[in-house]
Amino acid sequence: MAEYKKPKNESEFNQNFAQKKPLMNDTEAYYESSRCLFCYDAPCMNACPTHIDIPLFIKQIHTDNVEGAAATIYDANWFGNACGKVCPTGMLCEGACVYNHQNVPPIDIGRLQNYATDKVIREKTKLFKEGESNGRKVAVVGAGPAGLACACELKTMGYEVDVYEAKSKPSGLTVHGVAPYKITNEEVLAEMDYLQEQLNYTIHYNHPVNADEINKMINKYDAIFLGVGLGATAKRGLPGEEKEGVVGAVEFIEELRMNHSDKSVGDKVVVIGGGNTAMDAASGSARLGASEVTLAYRNSKEKMGAYDFEYDLALHAGVKGLFNATPLEIIGNGSVSGVRFIRTKEENGKLTEVQGSEFTIACDQVIMATGQAKQTQLFQQIEGLKLDDKNRLVVNEAYQCTHPKFFAGGDAVNGGAEVVNAAYHGKIAAQGIDNWLNNK
């Protein structure tokens, strides 16, 4: 039986997709910040990919210096507000909190971070300014976390920055590919507006760039940052994949984020995959009112790539887990009517199929959460760029590519990670660009 009814309007949508990390009020922030032990060698800070000075910003909140707290956060992470909500804090900063060793709940670091940054965004507090112009110009390809973090950092150093974005909105997967119960569109775009109003980088929306245009940028710009991320959901070559009712998980979540209650979903949905995107797609389907959602993964639950808390969120939304089941075929006459599976087992460390164990699950929608295609073809057409054996851009410690005029970060470099990792890459790459151009 479905846990959620189909939302008919924005109010019902917001109820179904209530925020997992709701905004703290002043009293909550005061008392939560008072719990911090302000560790000298703070493990939370070491666990943060951007190394935010967490004890400092929590102390600033507790002493009613919220503006200072926000400045401390943004000094390390240009996506400070978004990361307070979408980061897997339980696996990072909060997971490293010393309270975990005392059977005491860890400090709610993510919500405190979101509290401080939300306040300066709403009040339009000016924290940043453009650096004095140095006469140099940098192109940033992609307005995702890596690209915009790079743009922000460069602007503080006096560079002119042009950002080229294929879509009509900034922030990449933060607004297009994260489940709506983690962060709202309004919150994401408010932070993007806040940064751009203060730092004045230029974004060219609806402007996808091909290899020819990027190659021409070599003569037009002093440096180029590639923050293009990953592409569409990768095809598996599964028979029946072309049938009506089969969609990619990334595309499904993007439509959900853009259309809210206007987004339709099947009555019985099968989600194929075991990563965090699969969990978001499954939970999103349930919250949209699907009567039955089955999350199917070819291996055991323990081998899933998704975080445990993401799977728990899906279960609490009414999703059913199906493990050790490999899809053989999507069946149906034109439209999806089911998925035929075969059971699997592990033998000598290898996953094998159990002969004679085929079965079918009836459904009218299949969501393929099978990973995203890399931008291999684009990169191969840019002279001088090298890729590793996983088709990721090869970069050095400054995120400089093998063609010295190019720098890169985010999913194009790590193959797919968190928003916070991409934001860190962009910031460090901007510093690398500055050092390279000034022969430091």
Image: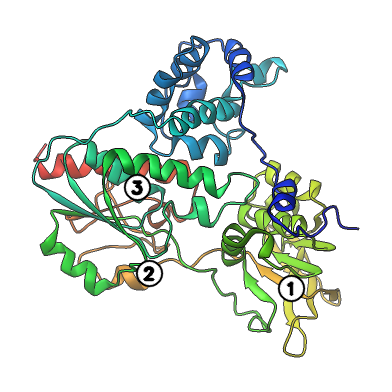
Question: Residue visible at 79% across and 73% down?
Answer: 342
Mark 2 vs mark 3, foreground winner is 3
* The quarter of the displayed image where residue 321 is located: bottom right
Query: How far across and how far down the image is residue 112, in percent?
Result: 55, 25
* The quarter of the displayed image where residue 216 is located: bottom left
Q: Is residue 116 above or below residue 398?
A: above
Q: Which amino acid does the dot numbered 3 rest on? A: Leu
Q: Earlier in the sequence, mark 2 or mark 1?
A: 1
Residue at mark 3: 148
* The quarter of the displayed image where residue 438 is located: top left
Q: Earlier in the sequence, mark 3 or mark 1?
A: 3
Q: Nearer the viewer, residue 77 or 19?
A: 19
Single out the residue that lies furthest toward the right.
1
Query: How far across and how far down the image is residue 353, in percent?
Result: 76, 71
Q: Is residue 187 left or right of residue 333?
A: left
Residue at mark 1: 365
Residue at mark 2: 376
Q: Is residue 227 left or right of residue 5?
A: left
Q: Which amino acid does the dot numbered 2 rest on? A: Thr
